[in-house]
Image (spheres, rainbow, N blue to C red):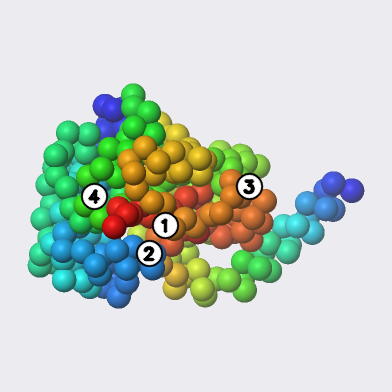
Amino acid sequence: MSLVKTFYDILPFNKSDDDSLRKQINKSNTPWKSLDTAVSNSNTVLELGCGQGWLSNRIANNYSVEVTGIDLIKENIDRAKGYNIPNTSFNQEDILQTTRTADTVVSIGVLHHIPDHDISFLLEQAILKSNQYCFMGLYHTSSRRAMFDFYDKYPKHKQYKLFKKMTPWIKDETQRKSWFRDQLRHPYEVTIDLSVLQAAALSTGRKLTWCNFDNDDQYDITMSKLKSYEFIPGFVYAMFEEEK
Amino acid sequence: MKFIKNLIERIRGEIQYRKNLKRMKDKDPFLYD
């Protein structure tokens, strides 16, 4: 874990010195309808690995909920607090240690970067922290493989230039660098197939109510988007719900 | 032959990229799928 913590201590993901994060917070919905529905039916939200707080702050900005974000990196917590959005609290905490729970638990792109623990175990633990809804974003095996295969066609020294072309919405080079190393130079990541999500639902007694993929064969579709320089890092998103 | 095939693929990708550029600049950056 210390390897990953050091990686983010050097440059936290999404660190930006311009107002791009503020723009993300000001958007009127989360990027996922499924999460918007969950949050609108909740009183409390917990984000595991909130980073610099764009999602927690955006949720608190748009819904009548109390949002708590936790993250291991102090700089992230300080930045997340700095937006001063009401009904938020941000705390430097290890997501493996926290005993917090909430109506909706959300975690995007975090659990697959935690070494020394089985991803299925981490997923189950996260799901069980939710009273009603748990929304997860994790790396998907075939989609992620397409992304690496696409970048491997280019020499390493040209990959950042390619990444820049594929991320035209990022204006700040520090932020772009933080995305690039997070996506392509990370010291640790695991990927999952849909069977991992289904098994987690079964073992926690929750229902898998939504997923952006209906099969694991995502290589070709991901590669075709990458070939037109669309940035597709290979995420699978899933919503787990407590059955009433 | 392979070179020509790759070149055509790159040109097609570039044309599609230019068509998508405005949408990519405006899209929610975290909507990855």
Q: Chain ID for label 2?
A: A
Instruction: Look at the picture and state if A96 lies above or below A212.
Output: above
Q: Residue at image x 27%, y 32%?
A: A6
> Which secondary structure, mark 3?
loop
Alpha-carbon span between mark 2 and mark 3: 23 Å
Residue kind at label 3, given as amino acid type: Asp
Label drawn at residue A125? none
The residue closer to the viewer here, A63 or A167, is: A63
Q: Chain ID for label 4?
A: A
Tags 3 and 4 touching, CB below 8 Å: no
- Mark 4 — residue? A130
Q: Is residue A230 left or right of residue A38?
A: right
Residue kind at label 1, given as amino acid type: Thr
Spot occupied by residue A125 in the image (x, y as percentages of width and height): 28, 38
Task: Please tell me which of labels 3 and 1 falls first in the chain.
Answer: 1
Residue kind at label 4, given as amino acid type: Ser
Tags 2 and 4 touching, CB below 8 Å: no
Alpha-carbon span between mark 3 and mark 1: 20 Å
Instruction: Look at the picture and state if A16 lies above or below A33.
Output: above
The residue closer to the viewer here, A21 or A93, is: A93
The mark total stands at 4
